[in-house]
Amino acid sequence: MTKSKVGLESLGLQTAAEVYWNLKQDQLIEKAVGNGEGKLTAHGAFVATTGERTGRSANDKFLVQSEPSQDKIWWGTVNKSIGADVFTQIKEEVLAYLGSRNELFVQDLFCGAEPSERLPIRVINETAWHNAFAANMFIDPTDAERAEHEPKFTVLHAPHFNTIDKDKYGLNSNVFVLMNFEERLVLIGGTQYAGEIKKSIFSVMNFLLPQKGILTMHCSANAGPDDSAVFFGLSGTGKTTLSADPDRALIGDDEHGWGDNGVFNFEGGCYAKMIDLSAEAEPEIFATTRMPGTLLENVILDDNGVPDFTDTSLTENTRGSYPIEFIENRVVSGKGVHPKNIVFLCADAFGVLPPVSRLTPEQAAYHFMSGYTAKVAGTEVGVTEPQATFSACFGAPFMPSHPSVYAELLSKKIQDHGVTVWLLNTGWIRGAYGVGERISIKWTRRLLNACLDGSLADGEFDYFVRFGFEIPKSCDGVPSEILNPRNTWANGDAYDNQADRLVTMYRDNFEQFEAGCSEAVRKAGPRPLAMSHSGVVDAQPVA
């Protein structure tokens, strides 16, 4: 199945290759197996390995600095600049490389379920399985839409092009992810990790839509009978797991917009972490790994061809990509009404934060810009104790504009729609990592359900001094003694010292945002015990 190469030639891509245009998923997987790009599991899912890069290459992402976009970008360690002339030279190398391939795979797709805001995109790959990934993760046009499809952004994806002269171009390695908002073009080379494809387009949406007053969010979302809920969180905090709820329909698991009509999914699929996946804990996600059309990354198979999700010999960041249609309980339109609840997820490995807290609008802005979670020992080389991780807006690597742009949009929408904001800690209780234990998903789900059904908001609350949070006194099905973390530590002084450490980390991180924040937001942050109420009692009844 081929198509005219006019669309490629307009990019300057001259090729004698066989170009496969908009193949269906089964055709792409058949090609991928035939080309030796991976193999099938015992259940017919496809599995591939990604070589040296098993996650995003954040240090290798650059944005072209040119007019008029450069004045709207928050330049720094996250958004690093590259000159337009350098981009042009690398583009010519990528075009020449792709033009020399025997086969190319092209998909014309949409990003965004809201028709008025969706972005027509084109993804050009040298490998069939990465093209299948793009087909999974974005929205498939109808035949009529595809006939009139004109891409507004194009991704040139060359994962096996690893001979770039990094010193000549000022790159950090032979991997590159380059975005040019003027040319509406993304170049990806040297990395087989498929997530770079979807995250590059997410970054594009995060640049374009806020200029139209639409909040772009690194979040999952689901819907009840008359509401929707949004879940922000960094990788490993439970964003995908907690939004997959048998009693609520999934809108999407990772990327959304919030406009005048409510929330809408950017994607047509899900990209879930597979580590320790089980049928008991996450039945809906586990079931997708038994379906042809699912793509597994760096997952180890046993001798019978069955995935072993406990095997992290290649990476802890094992992944699965599947069409959202594989989740039976979903919102078919990919859209939901304005949310009643927003949930910030964090995995606090310091054992300091309560399992659940209710936030004021000012606290919501502060913690949205902070984007806190923690890494634990053993997850990365050199990490021997918990390390705080702050990622602005819970997605700093994908946010080209200043975090205040997104925080101001969030605050306005919270105010306009009367949204309740919760901070849900999926991390450690009864002590820090290595001493305490991670809160059970059963308790976390009970707390979350009580947030979403309104029962928690109707109960009684205590005041959590250091952070100024309201914390519930009780929740059905959850031991009341764990709701105030200080009470669960064997040594209260040890808790106080640990809490002050985390507060200091929060305050140090937030210094970079203070100039652009209101006084109310600045004061909404946590305080060391010495700056809080006198004494060491961390909970007082809310008047």
Image: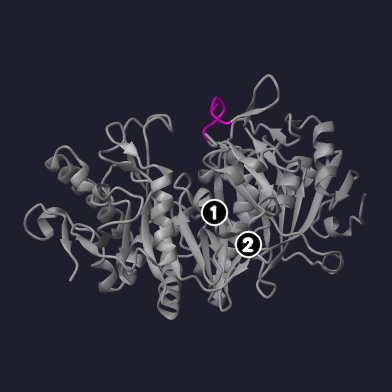
Marks 2,1: beta carbons within 8 A: no
* Residue 255 among magenta residues: no
The residues colored magenta run 309-316
Label 2 sits on residue: 266
* Residue type of the residue flagged with mark 1: Asp
Q: Which mark is residue 245?
A: 1
State which quadrant residue 351 falls in: top left
Nearer the camera: disc 2 or disc 1: 1
* Left or right side of 80 for 391: left
Q: Residue at x 70, y 25 (%)?
A: 305
Q: Is residue 279 above or below residue 314?
A: below
Question: Secondary structure under badge 2?
Answer: loop
Q: Residue at x 14, y 38 (%)?
A: 491
Question: Secondary structure under badge 1?
Answer: loop
**Quarter of the image where the C terminus is located:** bottom left
Residue 6 in picture, x, y percent from top left: 89, 59
- Return the residue nearer the eye: 348 or 10: 348
Q: Is residue 385 above or below residue 522?
A: above
Can the viewer see residue 353? Answer: yes
Q: Is residue 424 above or below residue 493?
A: below
